[in-house]
Image (tube, helix red, strand yellow):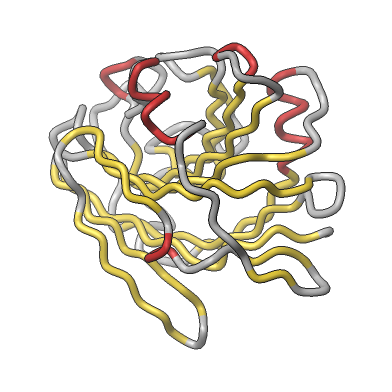
Amino acid sequence: MIPTKRKLTSCGIVMLTLLSSAVNSYGETLIPFDQWRQKDFVGTNKFIYSNTDNIATVQIDSDQTASGLFLEQQVDLNKTPILNWSWKISNTLHSLKERTKKGDDFAARVYILTSTGPFPWQKKTLSYVWSNYQSVGESWPNPYTDTVMMIAVDSGKKLQGTWQHHQRDVQKDLQAAFGEKFDKIDVIAVMTDADNSKQKTTGWYKGFEFTRE
């Protein structure tokens, strides 16, 4: 579920509190999820935070609801363009047309937001998703707004219940999606939502870090 333009503004694209991060010689590690801001769109998801082997993890349970966690933090894509993360889902969602407003539900998604100015048309967003059925590598404009590009990085039931690790060159993905080079991002977010489908699902997220390669 992608919010309306009014909800997109309230998402925290321009309103979240700036939070700090730990920086090492290899890249930029984001702060633990329990220090991110929660935003509820439809109902309230259940959030369970844990820390295993010094890796912060969040479990997000959705029961016909849509909630996310948002962190406003600038990342220099010229220095650290590669986003690393791992995620897992309990189950995909069935009987959805993902490219329509009524079908815009995903067990796991990661948002990357960037802005070149204060106006809505100057804000661009990538939404990496665990698609319910789209082929891995498929991309499509979000049905609510063409300033958000969806990208399927996992798909279907085959790998559900198992951790999947991803590395994405955010700078290249942004340029491919919107036709211009972006030097930074401003916000990163995670969300699990099943409000449109009136179903239940769970997403787990961990290991967020920006690196050079």
Quick one: 47 or 134, which is closer to the camera? 47
Give left or right: position of 138 versus 170: left
| 98, above or below 212, in the image | above
Residue drawn at x 80%, y 36% as measured from the top left: 183
Give left or right: position of 136 versus 6: right
Asked where in the image residue 4 lies, by quadrant, the reply is: top left
Q: State the image coordinates of residue 138 (x, y, percent, origin top left).
A: 58, 29
Give left or right: position of 173 versus 53: right
Residue drawn at x 60%, y 22% as measured from the top left: 123
Residue drawn at x 18%, y 40% as measured from the top left: 65
Q: State the image coordinates of residue 182 (x, y, percent, origin top left).
A: 78, 31
* Quadrant in which the C terminus appears: bottom right
Asked where in the image residue 8 lies, by quadrant, the reply is: top left
| 62, above or below 32, in the image | above
Quick one: 105 or 136, which is closer to the camera? 105
The total number of labels drawn is 0
Residue drawn at x 71%, y 30% as measured from the top left: 174
Give left or right: position of 14 versus 92: right
